[in-house]
Image (cartoon, grey):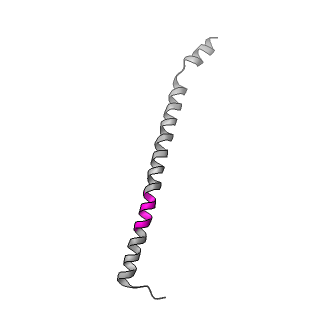
Amino acid sequence: MKLLRLFIADQKGATAIEYGLIATLVSIIIFGALGASGLNLSGYYEYVGGEIIAAFGPSEQ
């Protein structure tokens, strides 16, 4: 019985789970933000690449 009471009173596991949930939420927000900005950056790089080709002409192969 003493072991069972100690197990129930132990809060270390609950704290670890809470930190895990917080870390998961933060990582979801970060990946979402990077995914959204990645689409914008892709379009920007395509634009810049097109402008460079227009300024210097197509490369000769």
The answer to whether residue 32 is magenta is no
User: Residue 42: x, y in percent?
Assistant: 44, 65
Residue at the top extreme? 1
Q: In terms of image quadrants, where is residue 53?
A: bottom left
State whether residue 34 is above or below residue 54: above
Question: Magenta region: which residues?
Answer: 37-44
In screen coordinates, is 61 left or right of 7? left
Looking at the image, which is closer to me, 61 or 52?
52
User: Residue 60: x, y in percent?
Assistant: 45, 88
Q: Residue at the spot x=54%, y=20% of the render?
A: 10
Residue at the right extreme? 1
The answer to whether residue 43 is magenta is yes
Q: Residue at the spot x=37%, y=76% of the render?
A: 51
Name the dominant secondary structure of the magenta segment. helix
Q: Residue at the spot x=52%, y=25% of the render?
A: 12
Q: In terms of image quadrants, where is residue 37?
A: bottom left
